[in-house]
Image (tube, rainbow, N blue to C red):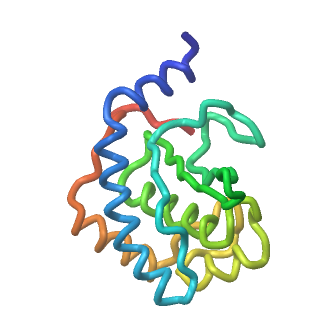
């Protein structure tokens, strides 16, 4: 098994449900923030804490998150969010917000002008693919982390760069 395959297996088997549950609760809190700025996102978005099974589209081992989509049998988009299992709680929430912006715009749209408008409205900077929380949103994420409690950590000493 390669190092990446070992990380994928470990991420899937050891602790993802607890991390996914934690992030799902965070998403429900953040849902109100998106509604307040007038950009709701789809009601059902499962969160998976794992590496993507295929590293594609410039995704590498330093990958942090992804919003994936496909059309269901009726032609409606169906979304899911993947979060890197090696990040800490605040970083995971920040990545989650970025991916929620994608879901609000439509994951298939990428980093378009509308992505930047929603990202800025929710409190992220405008650096596109690496858009992260500015100070007001960062304080909000810290408050959410306090509500949710400590983020379950899979890898205590491994950080993928």
The relative height of residue 79 versus residue 117 in the rendered view (above or below) is: above
Q: Residue at x 36, y 33 (%)?
A: 155
- Position of 39 relative to 66 (above/below): below
Q: Position of residue 154 (x, y in %)?
A: 34, 35
Residue 114 location in percent, x, y?
A: 73, 78
Q: Position of residue 149 (x, y in %)?
A: 21, 59
Q: Is residue 20 left or right of residue 48?
A: left
**In the picture, which quadrant includes the N terminus?**
top right
**Residue sitting nearer the eye, 105 or 83:** 105
Q: Residue at x 76, y 64 (%)?
A: 109
Taking the view exactly as shown, the residue that stands out farthest to the top is 1
Tell me the residue at 46%/44% (across/down). Answer: 48
Quadrant of residue 42 in the image? bottom right
Is 88 rendered above or below residue 147? Answer: above
Q: On the rendered structure, is 86 left or right of 41?
A: left
Q: Quadrant of residue 22?
A: bottom left
Q: Position of residue 83 (x, y in %)?
A: 50, 48
């Amino acid at each position: 098994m390669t190092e990446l395959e070992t990380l994928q297996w470990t991420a899937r088997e050891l602790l993802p449900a607890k991390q996914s549950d934690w992030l799902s609760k965070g998403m429900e809190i953040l849902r109100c923030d998106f509604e307040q700025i007038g950009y709701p996102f789809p009601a059902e978005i499962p969160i998976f804490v794992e590496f993507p099974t295929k590293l594609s589209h410039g995704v590498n081992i330093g990958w942090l998150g992804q919003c994936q989509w496909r059309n269901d049998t009726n032609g409606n988009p169906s979304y899911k969010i993947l979060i890197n299992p090696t990040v800490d709680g605040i970083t995971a929430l920040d990545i989650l917000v970025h991916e929620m912006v994608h879901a609000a715009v439509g994951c298939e749209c990428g980093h378009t002008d509308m992505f930047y408008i929603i990202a800025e409205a929710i409190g992220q900077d405008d650096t596109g693919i690496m858009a992260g929380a500015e100070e007001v949103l960062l304080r909000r994420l810290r408050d959410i982390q306090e509500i949710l409690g400590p983020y379950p950590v899979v890898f205590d000493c491994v950080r993928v760069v």
